[in-house]
Image (cartoon, grey):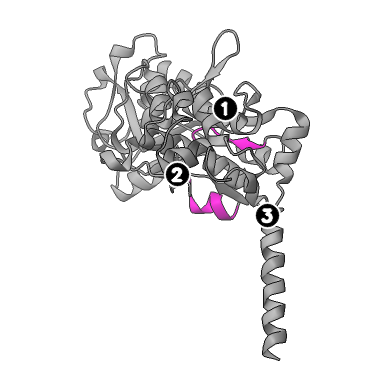
Amino acid sequence: MKQVIRAALIAVTAAICASGAQAQSPTLAQVKNRGILHCGSGTGLAGFGIPDQQGNWSGMDVDVCRAVASAIFNDPAKVKFIPLSAKDRFTSLQSGEVDLLSRTTTWTISRDTALGLNFAGVNYYDGQGFMVRKKLGVDSVLKLAGASICTQQGTTTELNLADYFRSNKIKYEVVAFASNQETVKAYEAGRCDAFTTDASGLYAERLTLSNPDDHMVLPEIISKEPLGPVVRHGDDVWLDIVKWSLFAMINAEELGVTKANADEMLKSDNPEVKRFVGTEGKFGEPMGLTNDWAYRIVKHVGNYGESFERNVGSGSLLKIARGQNALWTKGGLQYAPPIR
């Protein structure tokens, strides 16, 4: 009897292993058949996702989509960016209009569970802040009693605003708009005393105002806003592809693999680098990718640090410090599991 049970267990184990090796992603198959990735993006936020006058998109969220396209097609240009408002973003992902949502979206339990979505990681650790006109004479959020505050509907920002002012027993008037552009326009037109959104967004939008020096960002950060790419429930392999595309960018920075030296790294004797660039092991095959998938990402898009500096850091107009978005080895929160 023991031999029969043992044989049955071996058969089941073999079947499970075979099933895992043959795992397929319906989303990946659809993207390959279509020949292009459909990426749900923001409607235009400097540093994270914005098109230029020729329609070329750039930003940290844009780089996540270009990384996924590079892993699949070896071509970062094979992405169609579909601008989505905060209100419409989740229904567009749920309905299949987009394959991936990458547009400053905060990871929360309700979005991760009740909406049938999966967050693939955190590509930017942010927090909610406030901007006011300097002539208002306010240097703290706690001095905004009775103020009118512009914000965007359907965001965690609107909810955090209510929580913070209620817990501090401060009266305020909310002035909410459907889109970020409408919210900024209303603030600049003087329809409210303050504008609140993610701190990164405040610095980006401040540069778009007629006289940026007339405005200041207050020091308080009132929330945790871990922002990251999102996919639908029900396609675990697709979740793996998006998740590990982001992890590849973070691992590349830690290993010192850059856009400039990626080709040279193909000759590396470092076991970790060899697994990363695909000259050792077969880590792409279980996801339906080639084994040089991570090399392709860095070759075309660069590592996480390069993306940060280019889009929001010292190489950009925003000049945002790495802070919490530094690697874990440098006091930050950015950490990726190993490729092994």
Query: In the drawing, does residue 257 fall left or right of residue 240?
Result: left
Q: Separation of disc 3 and disc 1 at Cα? A: 26 Å
Residue 331 at x, y percent in the picture: 26, 41
Residue 27 at x, y percent in the picture: 71, 42
> Which three-letter amino acid code belongs to the residue tagged 1?
Arg
Of pointers 3 and 1, the one earlier in the residue sequence: 3
- In the image, 105 versus 175, the foreground residue is 105
Residue located at (57% from left, 35% from top): 292
**Callout 3: few (<14), some (14-19), or many (20+) C-alpha neighbours within 10 Å?**
few
Question: In the image, which residues are magenta?
Answer: 99-114
Q: Which mark lies nearer to you, 3 or 1? A: 3
Q: Separation of disc 3 and disc 2 at Cα? A: 43 Å
Q: Residue furthest right?
A: 33
Query: In the drawing, does residue 1 fall left or right of residue 89?
Result: right
**Callout 1: few (<14), some (14-19), or many (20+) C-alpha neighbours within 10 Å?**
many
- Tell me the element at label 2: helix
Q: Which mark lies nearer to you, 3 or 2? A: 3
Circle 3 residue: 21
Residue 78 is drawn in which quadrant? top right
Residue 171 within the segment the image draws in magenta: no
Residue 190 at x, y percent in the picture: 40, 18
> Which three-letter amino acid code belongs to the residue tagged 3?
Ala
- In the image, 18 versus 187, the foreground residue is 18
Residue located at (71% from left, 59% from top): 19
Q: Separation of disc 1 and disc 2 at Cα? A: 31 Å
Q: Is residue 315 above or below residue 192?
A: above
Q: Which mark lies nearer to you, 1 or 2? A: 1
- In the image, 89 versus 268, the foreground residue is 268
Circle 1 residue: 66
Circle 2 residue: 159
Residue 270 at x, y percent in the picture: 40, 39
Residue 107 within the segment the image draws in magenta: yes
